[in-house]
Amino acid sequence: MGDQEARLIKKIKKGNQQAFKKLYDIYADYSLRTAYAITNNASDASDIVQETFIKVFRNIDSYDSKKPFKPWFYQILVNESRRYMKKKSQEAISIDSEQLLDHLNQDKTELEDDKQLEIAMEQLDEHHRTILVLKYINGFSEKELADMLQLNINTVKSRLYKARQKLKAVIGGAQDE
């Protein structure tokens, strides 16, 4: 965790609302993009981010300052996204396809248009979509994903591998048509 974040967290734990506002300013845009990538709905994403920051504020005392803040924060964001989506019974998770294509360079998959990627992502189950978004859009390491999602690192690696394979299969099938 950066020195600025560490100081902000200490101030927030003491009830300093200005420090919380600064933390909000640091994470709000990125959180909104992530929530939007998961929900594909701006209004839902905004609600999720708002609920996430409320939970962060309420639970800041449970944060272990010896560990990085960002994965702790994103664990709350992901959990809140899942809770919200279950509540709304949404199953379609979409992502910014251009960013995913940039980050999946090792796959060398060429798509005719971005819509194909969105359709392909919608065919993946929630676990695989979420892990792809967090890894390739948000840039979390496998270790951070394991901590954040409360999974064994081998499970994370397996889900990433399977998600990439399923995505390739769906995209390959779409291109054959």
Image: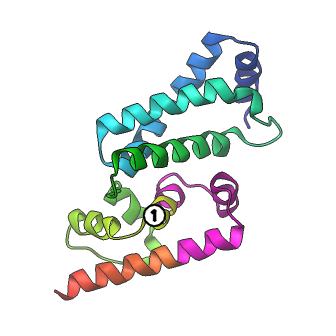
Closest to the observer: 155 or 105?
Answer: 155
From the viewer's perspective, is 161 left or right of 94?
right
From the viewer's perspective, is 172 left or right of 31?
left
Main SS, magenta residues: helix
Mark 1 is surrounded, within 10 Å at the Cα level, by few (under 14), some (14 to 19) or many (20 or more) other residues, namely some
Q: Quadrant of the C terminus?
A: bottom left
Closest to the observer: 147 or 142?
Answer: 147
Q: Is residue 106 visible?
A: no
Report which quarter residue 57 is drawn in.
top right
Residue type (three-letter) at the residue carrying disc 1: His
From the viewer's perspective, is 109 left or right of 160?
left
Report which quarter residue 70 is drawn in.
top right
Q: Residue furthest left?
A: 177
Residue located at (70% from left, 21% from top): 8
Query: Up-down: is 45 above or below 89?
Result: above
Residue 12 coordinates in the image, percent (x, y): 70, 18
Q: Which residues are magenta?
A: 132-161
Q: Is residue 45 rendered magenta in the image?
A: no
Closest to the observer: 105 or 118?
Answer: 118
Residue 148 coordinates in the image, percent (x, y): 65, 52
User: Label 1, on which residue?
Assistant: 103
Residue located at (56% from left, 17% from top): 21
